[in-house]
Image: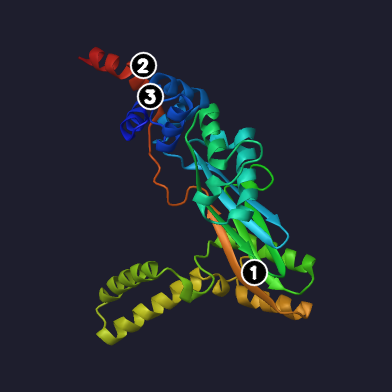
Amino acid sequence: MAEITAATVKELRERTGAGMMDCKKALGETQGDMEAAIDWLRTKGLAAAAKKAGRVAAEGLVGVAVVGTIGAVAEVNSETDFVAKNEQFQDFVRNVAQIALATGGDVEELARAQYPGHGTVAEMLTHNIATIGENQSIRRAARLEVPQGVVVSYVHNAAAPGLGKIGVLVALESEGDKAALEALGKQLAMHIAAANPLALHGEDLDPALVERERSIAQEKAAESGKPENIVEKMVEGALAKFRKENALLSQLFVIDNKTKIEDVVAAEAKRLGKDVKLVDFVRFQLGEGIERKESDFAAEVAAASGVGQKAEAGAA
């Protein structure tokens, strides 16, 4: 058996593009034989999957799952929207959301978790990349839980049950009627999908985001030419408006566009005769924040076939 050194693992990784731990395992399985290890990785689909790892994956699906008073949401990305319609991919996203009920928002822990009948989640992901032929990634996950009450899920632009472009979870803590809480939670989830609040309370907004808004407001106010004390009041007013419009509890309910969300919850609590607390929410929109590569498909095809070169030659 050939010695498995850091250098041989590095060489195998450079030749195949597979992950370091996969390369180490391949060499172990093949007694250190480099060529056999390459074949082993190819057989497992790991070398092929690694070659696709650099491609931008901004499409895919968001999946939601709820069991009892626990809910989870997960985003799994692919390169094209076409893959999101693939049953194998949809089944994977659905199962990942279910597994996230136990692992929560730690993507690394989620990747290490057991996947039904296929080793780990990470191993199943690699298998999917190799068999479907596109780069894919588990981007993020989150879990909400309440001791009593409901966690309600909602999917906007559903591609299949529990799968879509926007996934929302709403956690309501209460001893009130479950059916009524479910109905309230569904309305709130639909509001969240449409209004995209950035936090539950105004004071929970990302400080960096608030400072960015402050800078914008200061620049605008300064251009007014008003006295400094008035400018400061204008800035604080703009920030107060920003907090109000982006915090869920102070947003106006999309159904009537006049009632604050906190008042909607309070009214339902009064009707039920039980306290109702909107504990938290999660909203995942597919691909948000991912820098997508813009490309001209027709131009790429033309370039690959040499059409552009022929046209230039003809012009000359």
Vertical order, 219 against 227 (above or below): above
Distance from disc 2 to disc 1, alpha carbons, whole Å, reads 56 Å
| Pointer 3 residue | 2
The x and y percentages for residue 245 are 49, 70
Specify which label sits upstream in the sequence, 2 or 1: 1
Q: Are marks 2 and 1 in contact (CB under 8 Å)?
A: no
Vertical order, 121 against 150 (above or below): above
Specify which label sits upstream in the sequence, 3 or 2: 3
Residue 84 visible from this viewpoint: yes
The x and y percentages for residue 124 are 57, 36
Mark 2 burial class by Cα count in 10 Å: few <14, some 14-19, many 20+: few
The x and y percentages for residue 15 are 35, 26
Distance from disc 3 to disc 2, alpha carbons, whole Å, reads 46 Å
Mark 3 burial class by Cα count in 10 Å: few <14, some 14-19, many 20+: few
The quarter in which the C terminus is drawn is top left
Q: What residue is rendered at 47% in x and 35% in y? A: 135
In the picture as drawn, the residue positioned furthest to the left comes out as 316
* Marks 3, 1: nearer the viewer: 3
- Given the image, on which type of amino acid does mark 2 rest? Ser
Q: Nearer the viewer, residue 203 or 260?
A: 203
As helix, strand or loop, the secondary structure at mark 3 comes to loop
The quarter in which the N terminus is drawn is top left
Q: Kindly identify which numbered label has been placed on residue 256.
A: 1
* Marks 3, 2: nearer the viewer: 3
As helix, strand or loop, the secondary structure at mark 1 comes to loop
